[in-house]
């Protein structure tokens, strides 16, 4: 029934409808299906009633196979070992050996047990790796806390190292660069017709339809003209459009073929507008009433207002943006040109998105990926850094390393900036904690520091590390 998800992969045996498969394929325009056509489980029936014969169930469905791809990609992703752990593994044994050597040296020189133990204990205290232990968790805690305030959720410390290395960012189109919703972009009318009349009459008919394109037109009409009239007669013509009577006018809204069935032809200006719209990857809807073509409406998945700015910011961070989508090439290239992306991979099936990421990695690139759909989950898991839109599916969020709660592409640039800043803070903390201890060790070994001064100096290094980490609270997003 309309509005319900299709339960499993199958073949339509009865009925016709528009199926929204954007979650799986990235195709923003709903696909018209009828008897004999195949449909995929978890896609949304947006129009009429369908009777579907199941052909694949359980682990054999396309959705289950995609989940397996995600699992395989996650299992193959090695987690990075923390830098502090690597340093501590070497530093601590060296310090203990140095303390024992100090004790032996002073005892061997006949300085007595008390001065020898004092020097050895001072070595242990000044080198106590408290600051070393605090360096990573304090910066991570403050950084992730600030990220949460900005709507950026960081899964773990190993993510930070990847943000520094990333040099390529792959962007999904539908729902990431675009809104993922069909909207009315442009209205072309004949010289004798007003836009208000077109929207009022076409919107009234489309308001009675459940098709996503129809709803886009109805919403735009309501916004522009206010409450819409109620059609006196309404008929849905499967795969072509709708027709009916509105305010005494016989109105047709749909494909050019629907008008042709009533012997109505588009005049040259409207035919040119339709051709240009389709060349740009938009859906062209013809409107006619009382036996005459009146307008062509352009409907498309609108680009988010912030996407172009976000792409510029990502470039400024040293990342090369790439658009990756299952949508057709005309749509993909139109969107890419609008936001300033040069490299486009279009008409890519969900299972092939992983291959695109692997191919980029094989070229020596460190790949970040931003996506929101089930079709992006495996690619997010395969990428060196996965950024999932919080407005997307649970599968994508689970597969990502970072979650962008706002669903705004600007948040991706903020997330990378914050992650890099947090990593930089961790490295600064580690450097000062390590350098401070190393510089003071010779003084302690020479007996020039008593344990009380050494303890105070060690505490100061910890305070410095915590204070440096707290500077992350001043980080500002876009």
Image (cartoon, helix red, strand yellow):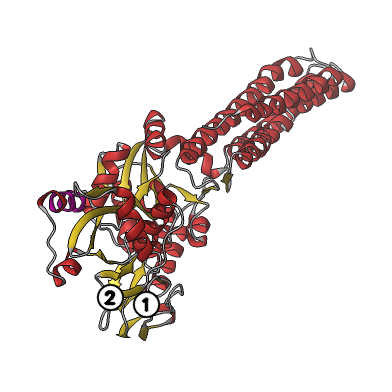
Q: Residue furthest front?
A: 248
Q: Is residue 246 above or below residue 452?
A: below
Pointer 1 local density, CA inside 10 Å: few below 14, some 14–19, many at least 20: some
Horizontal placement of 175 versus 470: left or right? left
Q: Is residue 320 above or below residue 277?
A: above
Name the residue tied to disc 1: 48
Q: Is residue 222 above or below residue 23?
A: above
Horizontal placement of 122 versus 81: left or right? right
Residue contact at pointers 1 and 2, CB within 8 angstroms? yes
**Is 58 covered by the magenta stretch?**
no
To which quarter of the image does residue 247 belong? bottom left
Which residue occupies the foreground of this view, 380 or 190? Answer: 190
To which quarter of the image does residue 317 belong? top left
Q: Where's residue 19, x and y in %?
A: 35, 70
To which quarter of the image does residue 83 belong? top right
Q: Main secondary structure of the magenta part?
A: helix
Name the residue tied to disc 2: 238
Q: Is residue 385 above or below residue 116?
A: below
The residues colored magenta run 271-279
Q: Residue furthest left?
A: 268
**SS for callout 1:** loop
Q: Residue furthest right?
A: 114
Pointer 2 local density, CA inside 10 Å: few below 14, some 14–19, many at least 20: some
Q: Residue at x 65, y 30 (%)?
A: 473
Q: Residue at x 32, y 57 (%)?
A: 353
């Amino acid at each position: 029934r309309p509005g319900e998800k299709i339960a499993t992969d199958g073949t339509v045996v009865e009925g016709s409808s528009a199926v929204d498969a954007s979650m799986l394929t990235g195709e923003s325009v709903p696909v018209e299906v009828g008897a004999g056509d195949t449909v995929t489980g978890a896609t949304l029936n947006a129009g009429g009633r369908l009777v579907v014969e199941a052909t694949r169930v359980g682990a054999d469905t396309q959705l289950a196979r995609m989940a397996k791809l995600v699992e395989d990609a996650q299992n193959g992703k090695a987690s990075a070992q923390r830098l502090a752990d690597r340093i501590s593994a070497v530093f601590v044994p060296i310090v203990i050996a140095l303390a024992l050597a100090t004790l032996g040296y002073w005892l061997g020189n006949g300085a007595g047990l008390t001065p020898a133990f004092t020097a050895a204990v001072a070595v242990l205290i000044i080198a106590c790796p408290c600051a070393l232990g605090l360096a990573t968790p304090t910066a991570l805690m403050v950084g992730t806390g600030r990220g949460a305030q900005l709507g950026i959720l960081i899964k773990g410390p190993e993510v930070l190292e990847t943000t520094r290395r990333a040099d390529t960012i792959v962007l999904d189109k539908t729902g990431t660069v675009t809104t993922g919703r069909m909207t009315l972009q442009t209205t072309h009318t004949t010289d004798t017709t007003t836009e208000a009349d077109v929207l009022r009459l076409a919107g009234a008919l489309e308001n009675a339809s459940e098709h996503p394109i129809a709803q886009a037109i109805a919403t735009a009409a309501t916004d522009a003209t206010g409450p819409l009239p109620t059609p006196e007669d309404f008929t849905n013509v499967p795969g072509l459009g709708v027709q009916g009577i509105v305010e005494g006018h016989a109105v047709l809204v749909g494909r050019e073929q629907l008008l042709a069935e009533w012997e109505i032809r588009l005049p040259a200006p409207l035919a040119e507008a339709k051709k240009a719209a389709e060349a740009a990857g938009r859906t062209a809807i013809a409107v006619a009433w009382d036996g005459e073509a009146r307008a062509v409406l352009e409907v498309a998945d609108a680009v988010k207002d912030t996407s172009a700015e976000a792409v510029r910011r990502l470039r400024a961070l040293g990342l090369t943006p790439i658009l990756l989508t299952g949508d057709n090439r005309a749509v993909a290239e139109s969107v890419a040109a609008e936001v300033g992306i040069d490299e486009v991979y279009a008409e890519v099936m969900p299972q092939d998105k992983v291959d695109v990421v692997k191919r980029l990695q094989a070229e020596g690139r460190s790949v970040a990926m931003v996506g929101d759909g089930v079709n992006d989950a495996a690619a997010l898991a395969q990428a060196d850094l996965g950024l999932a839109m919080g407005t997307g599916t649970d599968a994508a969020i689970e597969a990502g390393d970072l979650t962008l709660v706002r669903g705004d592409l600007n948040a991706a640039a903020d997330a990378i900036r914050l992650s890099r800043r947090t990593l930089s803070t961790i490295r600064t903390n580690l450097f000062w904690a390590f350098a401070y201890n190393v510089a003071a060790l010779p003084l302690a070994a020479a007996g020039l520091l008593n344990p009380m001064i050494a303890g105070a100096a060690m505490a100061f290094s910890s305070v410095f590390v915590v204070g440096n980490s707290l500077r992350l609270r001043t980080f500002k997003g876009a």
